[in-house]
Image (tube, rainbow, N blue to C red):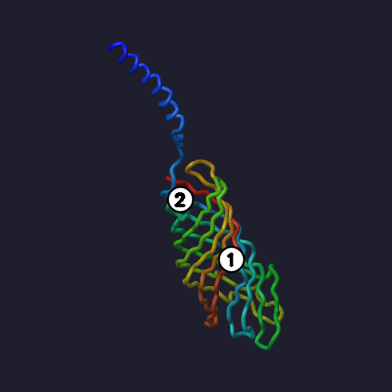
Amino acid sequence: MKTAIAALSLSVATFALPTGAMAADLDPPIVTTGPAGGLYMAARAGASWAEETDFNVGALGIASVENDYDPGFLGILAVGYDFANGFRGELELSYSKYDIDTHSASLIGGGVTPFPSSQSFGDAESFAVMASAYYDIDLGGIDPFIGGGLGWGRVEADGFGVSPLIGTLPGGVALDDSDSGLAYHITAGLSFDITDSLKAEVGYRYQGINADLASVTGASRSFDLTSHNAFVGLRVGF
């Protein structure tokens, strides 16, 4: 009887060993990934092209002045949170600056007097604080993203003017004013995984700040500063 029991136990053990090994082979492999989502910081910088602006004069024979800008600079610092479901939120501070290329004066009696770069001066600066939302499309390392933001911005027009005694028009500073208003942006780009916690970015942004500025004569006019921007950046996760 004992011999029969021992033989039966050996048979069961022999059958169980390959079955257990086979079950282990069928278990799904454990995949280790980097941290998903969480807090991050971002820095972005790039070239900026401001659209034309104009301001009222209403004196000295000049109705208004149109301003064209040289290419400028955009810089952004942001802190954000990645919700690991495609959505991210950011709070950002941005700064941009543009030097004047040319002014063109629209005359009260009709006609336009252009001023070349050598006779036009001044620069425009903008500051903005915005809350932004982004959506990332996960394609496995090179991921498109799109987003936008709203907030508060400030525009400063510093020393817009022309050299004196050009033709029949007097020179000097015609606009030196600043104002605050709504700031907004629409942004799209691509991000690239460098490490689990570091991403590089390239992108495009359309940005605007609403403002009303008054010339030295006191004449006020909408002076919305809008721009097209190409940038590169880095996002560092924690």
Query: What percent of the width, then of the height, locates residue 1?
Result: 28, 12
Q: Residue at x 47, y 67 (%)?
A: 153
Residue 167 badge: none
Q: Residue at x 50, y 60 (%)?
A: 94
Q: Secondary structure at mark 1?
A: strand
Question: Quick one: quadrant of the C terminus?
Answer: top left
Binning the other alpha carbons within 10 Å of mark 2 as few (below 14), some (14 to 19) or many (20 upward) gives: some
In this rendered view, identify the residue nearer to me: 77 or 215.
77
Q: Which mark is residue 41?
A: 2
Task: Pick whichever of labels 2 and 1 is earlier in the sequence.
Answer: 2
Residue 183, compared with residue 57, is above or below; it is: above
User: Could you say which quadrant of the image residue 174 lies in?
Assistant: bottom right
The x, y position of residue 99, in whole percent, is 61, 64
114, 203: nearer the viewer: 203
Q: What label does residue 227 carry, if any?
A: 1
The amino acid marked with disc number 2 is Met
Q: Residue at x 41, y 49 (%)?
A: 38
Residue at the outermost front position: 1
Q: As rendered, which of 211 and 88 lies closer to the eye?
A: 88
| 8 up-or-down from 19: above or below | above
Q: CA distance from mark 2 to mark 1?
A: 24 Å
Q: Nearer the viewer, residue 75 or 80?
A: 80
Q: Is residue 131 visible?
A: yes
**Three-letter code, disc 1:** Ser
Q: Secondary structure at mark 2?
A: strand
Q: Residues within 10 Å of mark 1 (few under 14, many from 20)?
A: many
In which image quadrant can residue 118 be found?
Answer: bottom right
